Amino acid sequence: MESNAILAVIPHLRRYARAMLSDRAAADDLVQDTLERAWSKFSQLRNGSDMRAWMFGIMHNLRIDQLRRPALVTRPIEDEDFEMPTRPTQTDKLEVRDISTALQQLPDEQREVLLLVALEEMPYSEIATTLGIPIGTVMSRLSRGREKLRILMEGPLPSTKLRVVR
Amino acid sequence: MNKHNITENELHAYVDGQLSTLRDAEVKEYLAAQPEVAERVRAYQSQNLALKALFNPVLDERVPTRLDALVSSPVVEVQALRTRTYLSRWSLMRLAAGVMIAVISGVSGWALHDKFLPAERMAKMQTLPRQAAIAHVVYSPDIRRPVEVGAEQEDQLVSWLSKRLGTPVHPPKLGAMGYELIGGRLLPGNSGPVAQFMYHDASGQRLTLYVSKEITGNSDTAFRFAQEGPVNVFYWIDGQFGYALSAGIAKAELGRVATAVYEQLEHK
């Protein structure tokens, strides 16, 4: 039963969306949009094709659409505008760094692949199909994403200034 | 050094458990001899674990009703309809999608008698009563300013709304049915302005007529009825116009008013 299959995927879509967007409401909005789109395209789902990959693909495309949509024009704030008092950093090596903060610093395309691998445990070939990219691209994004995350988590603190949020 | 020719890609596949058993063992052997690479691989493995630890709790959260309802409610409809063999699976899904749209806005109890209409037109038909009902629920309880232009300025109201809709619109007279015009307002529709006329009876019961010029195609329809929560809606399409009459009154009474509205619009 297709509907049960969709129901089973919802928690996975929510987990992934939460990790991608790090904003609970925005993530659930994205899931809702995905479900609506999925229903309207249901006839295109071929028998035997994988429901999870199909739904994640829809979510990916929706997100691309959202990102392409022109956003409000904002003026970037210079980092120097907000020189924050810094805390001592000597013990940082011993601390568990906040992986969610580091994750959000990855480029979208790398975060996407990393999350499908780490959370969904998707085979690389399935990720390629889901995102509509060659498998080589999957691997290079995964490799760069992981390395960047590692450096963010283990390397010297890059800066304690507030990051510019656009 | 790398006697097995382990590639970077295979290191990742090792981290993710996507290697064959044989290759997996070879990578292990390679890593044992390469502490620096092994360190990096361990970091990647702990990333996977940390991400799971961070986000897996979402899997156990109760799915918000708005998402759940999106899927579970149409299922009932689909299963109920499945016994009817004259409906293709495709049209079932279209129906389910239509039902789902209703569910999103917190609405249930759709009458699914539209199955012989072309799907696209059906979708339009289904948004009409929903939007009308929402507009009714939003504006009719407004005590101080339920309308933008009151009935005492009916000429102004008519010329204003006609101008904005780009076509003459007149509020029907429902005095004989016990409903007096309060006034009207302009609302945003899907692709342009729509008009809403509001009436009330002696007891203060309010009724709204929603007039949309967003209908394309030219197959007129008979009356249709939809119940959107506490609001009953009669709606129909006449040429390029979609009309929806909404009120929290009994279906039979609303039907009488709708018939009167329809006749007046026919013979204007």
Image: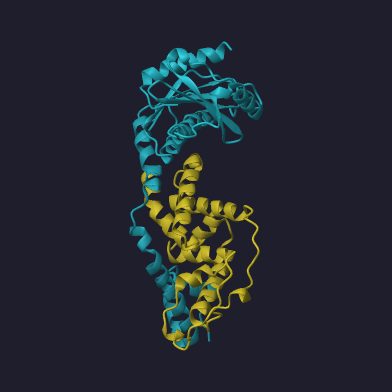
Q: Is residue B77 left or right of residue A131?
A: left
Residue A33 placement (x, y as % from top left): 49, 47
Q: Residue furthest top?
A: B267
Q: Is residue B53 left or right of residue B236?
A: left
Q: Which is nearer the eye, B2 or A110?
A: A110
Compared to residue B103, the image places residue B28 above or below, namely: below
Identify which residue is drawn at 51% across, 74% down: A149
Identify which residue is drawn at 42% across, 59% down: A15
Compared to residue A41, the image places residue A21 above or below, namely: below
Say which colour chain A has.
Answer: yellow
The answer to whether residue B196 shows anywhere in this view is no
Classify the position of the C terminus of chain B by image quarter: top right
The quarter of the picture where residue B85 lies is top left
The colour scheme applied to this rendered structure is: by chain
Residue B140 placement (x, y as % from top left): 45, 31
Say which colour chain B has.
Answer: cyan
Q: Residue furthest bottom?
A: A90
Identify which residue is drawn at 51% across, 50% down: A58
Q: Which is nearer the eye, B237 or B59?
A: B237
Identify which residue is drawn at 64% across, 53% down: A70
Compared to residue A141, the image places residue B174 above or below, namely: above
Residue A67 placement (x, y as % from top left): 59, 56
Q: Which is nearer the eye, B7 or B96?
A: B96
Residue A95 placement (x, y as % from top left): 42, 82
The answer to whether residue A48 shows anywhere in this view is yes
